[in-house]
Image (cartoon, rainbow, N blue to C red):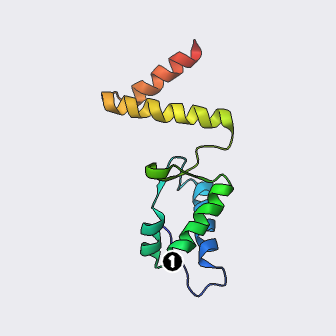
Amino acid sequence: MFTIDPDAATPPFEQLRLQVLEGIADGSLPAGTRLPTVRALAETLGLATNTVARSYRELEAAGAIETRGRNGTLIALSTDAAAHAAQEAAAVYAARVRALGVDPDDAIDYVRTALDR
């Protein structure tokens, strides 16, 4: 998912931070994507845990990611409060639809019908 160039002039924490932001911008890391734990990513990239933690802290301060304790670190849904709440509601709905075995196209039609009321 991420790579670090040890010979680059850019520090590793900044390389990682920029790669996450680029992934958000180009859509390869959509909202709600779970990121690896600090420890797992540090091990994968051959970095110190503090290096990955610094990247995550800076991304969280910028609103790009959300840390949810035991639930992990996710790409932020949105910095807009209304959009954030709507995205969370959509995620709950999607999980319920999957659990019920409802066809995704039908589920979207149900939402459109509800919105047209």
Say whether residue 22 is visible.
no
Quadrant showing the C terminus: top right
Q: Is residue 97 above or below residue 23?
A: above
Does 49 sit above or below residue 65? below
The x and y percentages for residue 8 are 62, 84
Q: 16 or 114: nearer the eye?
A: 16
Q: Quadrant of residue 86?
A: top right
Q: Which residue is mark 1?
A: 48
What residue is drawn where x is 53% and y is 77%? 4
Residue 46, position in %: x, y?
A: 46, 79
Toward the bottom, the furthest residue is 7
Residue 94: x and y in percent read: 43, 33
Residue ranking furthest to the front:
69
The kind of residue on which mark 1 rests is Ala
Q: At 51% from the left edge and 47% from the top edge, which residue is drawn?
A: 32
Picture quadrant of residue 101:
top left
Q: What is the number of callouts on the image? A: 1
Is 88 rendered above or below residue 70?
above
The residue at 58%/15% (across/down) is 116
